[in-house]
């Protein structure tokens, strides 16, 4: 009897420890949150595997140990998406927690971010002690400044030209501060040190200019990649070097988290603003495409245009964990709000949902959002899409966002979108089409759809 009671007591205590460990982050002090946003970096454009079950989801030529470290020490979301297939709509959507189909699918949009909920406002709603900063690229034609959107500190209304755009089609440029990576990193570290010393929880969005056109790097890095020989995909040696220098900046931020001894209270999120480019200046176009094994590229709603790296490291996240539940950049706002201790309702304009439960339980079936599934729309390219679970419906639409035709893919396995299953799975196709149509019909895209896109952006 005594031995049985002892065993029951031990098992009960073990259960309590497991339960407390799984929810400890909910009771901790407000955590620091760092969001690292790169530019034009494809889903498979790292040296570490994006999907451990698919050897094609990494490059044997690229060198990104810091990015890989975030995934190795945390969780990889194999079905992570950008809200749009180009930069500014994604940045606007991340800022406000909105689908680009709501807040604008192009650079120009009538959506005024300062008039809506934003990430810094959500964090301060949860805990007024938060100090928030935005460093690096803000976006094109964003209308509102970072400070007008609730940031305490920023680099201002920066854009593509800030990171270099002259002679952008040249294979490489040797400059003193390539893509401002060192400067953006320095500013971030200074902010982290100041807030840690002051005892404030902080949010830092680090929006690097790399690896957007134009290609900039140091001469020693270019020489290193020339010595490595030809890349394994259709990007250039200079582009690969620029990515490594970007990774070095990220590594400095991770090292500073360690030096400040705030790792146990700091989440690091890593993603990019859209999929990789289909061509890179100086790249060998006879080589495998830059985004393999995905189809398509930036500007497209094919997987290569919107599926992106999505990594998180932080308290209570099991190292090396993998989650296959679809998440998207407009989920960040509600996720950060919950991590910061927010409990009240967010405005109805917020389309995203919190994926906090997935951080400790990657097998949770889905993320709760006002609209089930992930919504994408780009009328200028005559396309819209919805991703729900293992499925993705890709639609051709007209300028008024009316659906003209559809394709259905089971993208959990068919990531190259080769097999249209709309005829074999008519009920699934009809259900997803109905859901997509309902959203498009009830939300007017505030971006104009008829103007021609500027070349090279």
Image (cartoon, rainbow, N blue to C red):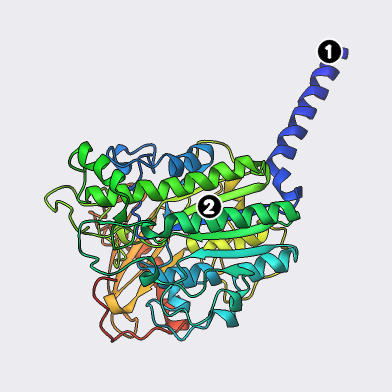
Instruction: Tell me the residue that label 1 is attached to.
Output: 3
Residue in the image at 23% along x and 47% along y: 237
Q: Residue furthest front?
A: 176
How far, Cα to Cα, is label 1 from label 2?
Answer: 47 Å
Quarter holding the C terminus is bottom left
Secondary-structure class at tag 2? strand
Secondary-structure class at tag 1? helix
Looking at the rendered structure, the number of numbered marks drawn on it comes to 2
Instruction: Tell me the residue that label 2 is attached to.
Output: 269
List x then y, in percent, for residue 28: 75, 48
Q: Is residue 123 visible?
A: yes
List x then y, in percent, for residue 302: 29, 61
Q: Quadrant of residue 342?
A: bottom right
On screen, residue 443 versus residue 227, left or right, reads right
Quarter holding the N terminus is top right
1 vs 2, front mark: 2
Q: Residue furthest left?
A: 286
Q: Quadrant of residue 334?
A: bottom right
User: Which disc is residue 117 wearing?
Assistant: none
CB atoms of marks 1 and 2 within 8 Å: no
List x then y, in percent, for residue 425: 32, 58
List x then y, in percent, for residue 355: 57, 55
Residue in the image at 48% along x and 37% along y: 72
Instruction: Compare residues 350 and 118 and report the one nearer the observer.
Output: 118
């Amino acid at each position: 009897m005594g031995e049985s009671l002892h065993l029951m007591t031990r098992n009960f205590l073990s259960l309590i420890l497991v339960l407390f460990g799984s929810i400890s982050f909910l009771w901790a002090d407000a955590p620091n949150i760092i969001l690292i946003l790169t530019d034009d970096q494809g889903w498979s454009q790292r040296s570490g595997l994006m999907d451990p079950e698919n050897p094609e989801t990494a490059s044997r030529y690229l060198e990104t140990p810091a990015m890989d470290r975030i995934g190795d020490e945390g969780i990889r979301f194999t079905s992570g998406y950008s809200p749009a297939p180009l930069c500014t709509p994604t940045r606007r959507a991340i800022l406000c927690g909105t689908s680009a189909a709501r807040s604008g699918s192009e650079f120009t949009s009538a959506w005024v971010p300062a008039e809506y909920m934003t990430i810094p406002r959500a964090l301060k709603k949860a805990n007024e002690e938060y100090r928030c900063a935005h460093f690096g690229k803000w976006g094109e034609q964003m209308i509102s400044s970072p400070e007008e959107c609730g940031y305490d500190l920023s680099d201002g209304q920066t854009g593509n030209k800030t990171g270099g755009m002259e002679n952008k089609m040249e294979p490489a440029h040797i400059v003193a501060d390539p893509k401002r990576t060192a400067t953006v990193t320095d500013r971030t570290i200074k902010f982290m040190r100041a807030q840690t010393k002051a005892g404030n929880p902080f949010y830092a969005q680090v929006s690097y200019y790399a690896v957007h056109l134009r290609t900039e790097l140091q001469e020693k890095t270019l020489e290193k990649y020339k010595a490595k020989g030809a890349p394994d995909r259709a990007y250039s040696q200079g582009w690969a070097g620029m990515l490594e220098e970007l990774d070095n900046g990220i590594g400095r931020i991770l090292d500073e988290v360690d030096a400040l001894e705030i790792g146990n209270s700091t989440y690091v999120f890593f993603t990019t603003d859209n999929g990789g480019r289909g061509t890179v200046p100086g790249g060998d176009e006879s080589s495998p495409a830059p985004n393999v094994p995905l189809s398509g590229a930036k500007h497209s709603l094919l997987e290569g245009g919107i599926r992106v790296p999505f990594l998180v490291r932080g308290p209570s996240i099991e190292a090396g964990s993998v989650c296959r539940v679809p998440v998207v950049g407009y989920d960040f706002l509600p996720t950060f709000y919950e991590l910061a201790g927010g409990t009240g309702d967010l405005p109805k304009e917020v389309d995203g949902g919190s994926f906090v439960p997935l951080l400790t339980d990657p097998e949770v079936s889905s993320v709760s959002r006002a609209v089930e599934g992930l919504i994408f729309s780009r009328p200028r390219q005559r396309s819209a899409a919805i991703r729900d679970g293992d499925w993705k419906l890709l639609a051709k639409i007209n300028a008024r966002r009316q659906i003209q035709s559809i394709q259905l893919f089971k993208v959990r396995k068919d990531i190259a979108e080769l097999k249209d299953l709309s005829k074999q799975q008519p009920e699934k196709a009809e259900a997803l089409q109905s859901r997509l149509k309902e959203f498009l019909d009830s939300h007017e895209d505030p971006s104009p759809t008829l103007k021609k896109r500027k070349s090279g952006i």
